[in-house]
Amino acid sequence: MTLTSGTAALKPGKGASAGAALNGGVISLTKGLAGDLSEKKIRVNVVVPGLVKSELWAKMGKTEEEQKEQFEKTTLPVGFVATPDDIAEAYLYLLKADYATGTSVEIGKSDRSRAFGKGLLTFCRWWGAAVEAVDSESSKSS
């Protein structure tokens, strides 16, 4: 099971107390369920994406250039705003990582030293290729 939270849990913005509490609750729920469900071999993890260029992004009422300028001021660690495909890589990683439970994967958040950003995406692509290679070898020897 993979849940979704938000970076407001880690660093709430002004006026975002309710969102921060909600997102923090999802992270705590993930860790609690991971322990509760481990005996049943059910893994529970959470993805915590930073800024994502989605349909909501387009509804901000600003030009592409204005949006870029606004978000460059937030010091994005990887220098760009993620796309939904970028975030999907984190979900794929957690689905393939049989040993991961109670794990919080934080992607592209600003001003936190543990931000993964593009490095995680590269690792996820590598991990996926490695798993496919092992699966391929296993099926040949069967």
Image (cartoon, helix red, strand yellow):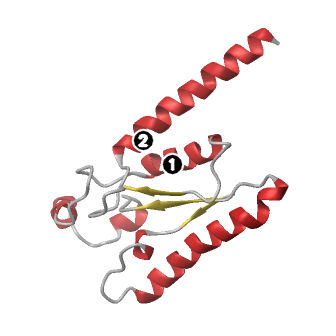
Q: Position of residue 68 (x, y in %)?
A: 20, 59
* Residue sitting at x 42%, y 62%: 55
Mark 1 surroundings: few (<14), some (14-19) or many (≥20) residues within 10 A: many
Figure check: 138 above or below 80: above
Q: Nearer the viewer, residue 58 or 140?
A: 140
Q: Which type of secondary structure does the marked residue at label 2 adopt?
A: helix
Tags 2 and 1 touching, CB below 8 Å: yes
**Residue 121 - label:** 2
In primary-sequence order, the first of circles 2 and 1 is: 1
Q: Position of residue 113 (x, y in %)?
A: 31, 58
Q: Quadrant of the N terminus?
A: bottom right
Q: Position of residue 58 (x, y in %)?
A: 34, 64
Q: Quadrant of the C terminus?
A: top right
Three-letter code, disc 2 = Leu
Asked if residue 19 lies left or right of residue 64, the reply is right
Q: Position of residue 83 (x, y in %)?
A: 39, 51
Quickly name the residue at label 1: 90
